[in-house]
Image (cartoon, rainbow, N blue to C red):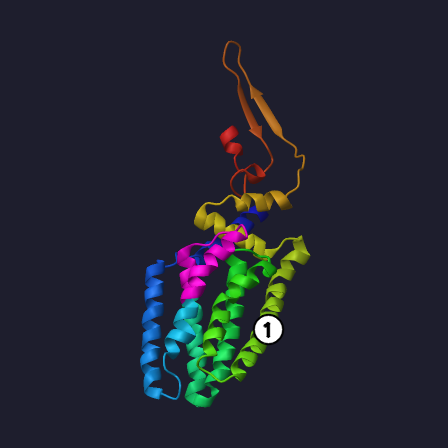
Amino acid sequence: MAFTSSDVRIENLSKYLFNAPSWPRSMATVIILGLIIDGAAFRLGEGMAFLGSLAFTIPAITAFVLTKPCIGLMGRSMTWNRSALLALTCMVLGVIITLSGMVVSRGLAALYYSIALGFILGIRLLVLVAIADYRTSRMIVPASLQSLTGMALGSLIFESMFLLLALVLQLVFLLGFILLIWAIDQPLYRAFNVRGLDFLNSFIAHLTDGSKKMEDFFREIGEEVYLPQVTLFFRRPGKRGHIFTVPNVHPGPLGEIGGGNLPKYL
């Protein structure tokens, strides 16, 4: 019964998976949203021209183009569609945070944009360690692509103090999200000596890409054991014999792990 409930819990995770929209659709949304913000910024004036393109569109496109190759250099994989969706999502979050500050006061635009860049860095780090590589230190560089580009281009819009403010806030958000990731990972690691995010990486790769990483994951944490087996032989004189065996093991959980391919051999 324990195996059944565990299998059900694992299978239930699949409801949180979805297919990312095609990258041209995501990038078209990025460009259109940037142009809309540009139009609104022109009406504001006060050095806010091309706010949408410089602060949001170009950083999102840069992150989209560079994230997949950057992760590939580390021996991991990420689709173009997921890279585009992540860039678009972070852009939307950045727009919401920045505009919320500008609604209060235009003078707060630099502060709220700096907060947005820090939040984007943290969200990208959290997502990438979940879907690409659970090792946080290896995901910091691809996670920072959108924020660093935004910080560089934001210096063309805002005053000189913006760079220092944005850098400090990005470090604060980076440390905060690293602690959050550590807190998420610790309960499962303490209980079973298993990295929860490593399991999530393998699970997503198994369901979406047909990867064998899930089998490798269970091989690493599995143990070889000897189990009792009951075998009954049936044979009549002059007839072909039959064997009925009860291996006393629940096949699974998947692939060739834990006797998952036992029915094939039997």
- The amino acid beneath tag 1 is Leu
Number of marks in the image? 1
Q: Secondary structure at mark 1?
A: helix
Disc 1: which residue = 171
Q: Position of residue 212 (x, y in %)?
A: 51, 43
Q: Residue at x 34, y 73 (%)?
A: 33
Which residues are the magenta region?
Answer: 61-86
The residue located at (51%, 60%) in the rendering is: 128
Q: Residue, x 47% and y 68% (percent of image)? A: 146
Whether residue 65 is in magenta: the answer is yes
Q: Nearer the viewer, residue 64 or 96?
A: 64
Q: Main secondary structure of the magenta part?
A: helix
Say above or below: 32 vs 66.
below
- Against 234, residue 221 (above or below) is below
Q: Is residue 250 visible?
A: no
Residue sticking out furthest to the top: 238
Q: Position of residue 260 (x, y in %)?
A: 53, 38
Report x, y in % for residue 75: 54, 50
Of residues 88 and 45, the one drawn nearer to the viewer in this rendering: 45
- 45 horizontally vs 144: left or right: left
Magenta stretch: includes residue 225 = no
Local crowd size for mark 1, using a 10 Å CA cut-off: few (<14), some (14–19), many (≥20):
some
Q: Quadrant of residue 141?
A: bottom right
Q: Tell me if I can see residue 200 in this picture.
A: yes
Tell me where residue 209 appears, x and y as whole percent. 44, 48
Q: Is 239 in front, or is 160? A: 160
Q: Is residue 179 above or below residue 242?
A: below
